[in-house]
Image (cartoon, grey):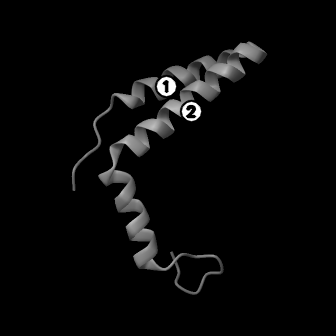
Amino acid sequence: MKANEQGALPTDVYLSFVSSLYEHRNTLLIGMLSHVVTFSLVFAKTSDFLYRLLCGGRACLAGAPIGHA
């Protein structure tokens, strides 16, 4: 990320944001569950099999361990 790129966040703000996501795993879990619910609702409305696959993939990722740095 270039420092003079328009719209780029300062490094300290970016690092604070990213570290807060990984310190509070509930944030990631809620985001993952919201994806699953959204894919499920779209599948129910459209019956497009792609959304069922996406929902299953996200549900599988919810149980995947997140590495520790």
Between disc 2 and disc 1, whose residue precedes? Answer: 2
Tag 1 residue: 57
36 in relation to 45, above or below: below
31 in relation to 7, above or below: above
The residue at 58%/25% (across/down) is: 37
Q: Position of residue 64 (x, y in %)?
A: 32, 32
Residue 59 found in image quarter: top left
Q: Secondary structure at mark 2?
A: helix
Tag 2 residue: 35
Q: Secondary structure at mark 1?
A: helix
Q: Residue furthest right?
A: 46
Q: Residue furthest bottom?
A: 4
Quadrant of image for the C terminus: bottom left
19 in relation to 65, above or below: below
- For this rendering, which residue is in front, 14 or 20? 20
The residue at 43%/64% (across/down) is: 17
The residue at 29%/42% (across/down) is: 66
Q: Position of residue 41 (x, y in %)?
A: 68, 21
Give the crowd class for mark 2: few <14, some 14-19, many >=20 residues within 10 Å. some
Q: Amino acid at mark 1?
A: Gly
